[in-house]
Image (cartoon, rainbow, N blue to C red):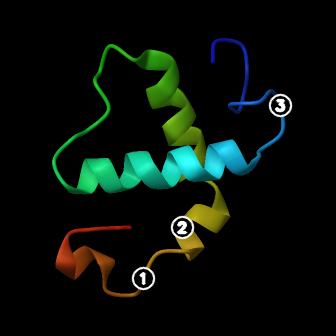
Amino acid sequence: MSGRDFVGGNRIGLADITLYCCLDFAKGVGQPIPAELKNINAWFQRMDQRPSAQQSLSPGWEQVGMRG
């Protein structure tokens, strides 16, 4: 992932969407991304800041403690 914005290069793709959903769910059930995986964490933050990621959240996600 070093030097790339997304999994497959510089354009978002299905692999990014799938990995984002999986890692977001894992985080919600107590399995966060290990801190030493700096490139993955940076990628996750980029994905998480996308307007589409924020708009896809269920209205009550904070109350149940899970985004995905």
44 left or right of 1 in image: left
Quadrant placement of the C terminus: bottom left
| Quadrant in which residue 59 is drawn | bottom left
In the rendered view, tell whether residue 3 sits above or below residue 22: above
Where does residue 25 sit, x and y in percent of width and height? 34, 56
In the rendered view, tell whether residue 15 sits above or below residue 33: below
Q: In this orientation, does residue 49 appear?
A: no
Q: What whole-number distance in Å separates the C-alpha atoms at marks 3 and 2?
A: 21 Å
| Label 2: which secondary element | helix
Q: Are marks 3 and 2 in contact (CB under 8 Å)?
A: no
Which residue corresponds to the image point at 32% horizontal and 32% vertical from the top-left? 33
Where does residue 31 sit, x and y in percent of width and height? 21, 41
Mark drawn on residue 10: 3
Question: Would you name the residue on which mark 2 appears?
Answer: 54
| Quadrant in which residue 4 is drawn | top right
Q: What whole-number distance in Å separates the C-alpha atoms at marks 1 and 2?
A: 9 Å
Which residue corresponds to the image point at 65% horizontal and 64% vertical from the top-left? 51
**How many discs mark residues in the rendered view?**
3
Q: Tell me if mark 3 has few (under 14), some (14-19) or many (20+) residues whose alpha carbon lies within 10 angstroms of its own.
A: few
Question: Would you name the residue on which mark 1 appears?
Answer: 58
Which residue corresponds to the image point at 39% horizontal and 17% vertical from the top-left? 37
Where does residue 35 sit, x and y in percent of width and height? 29, 21
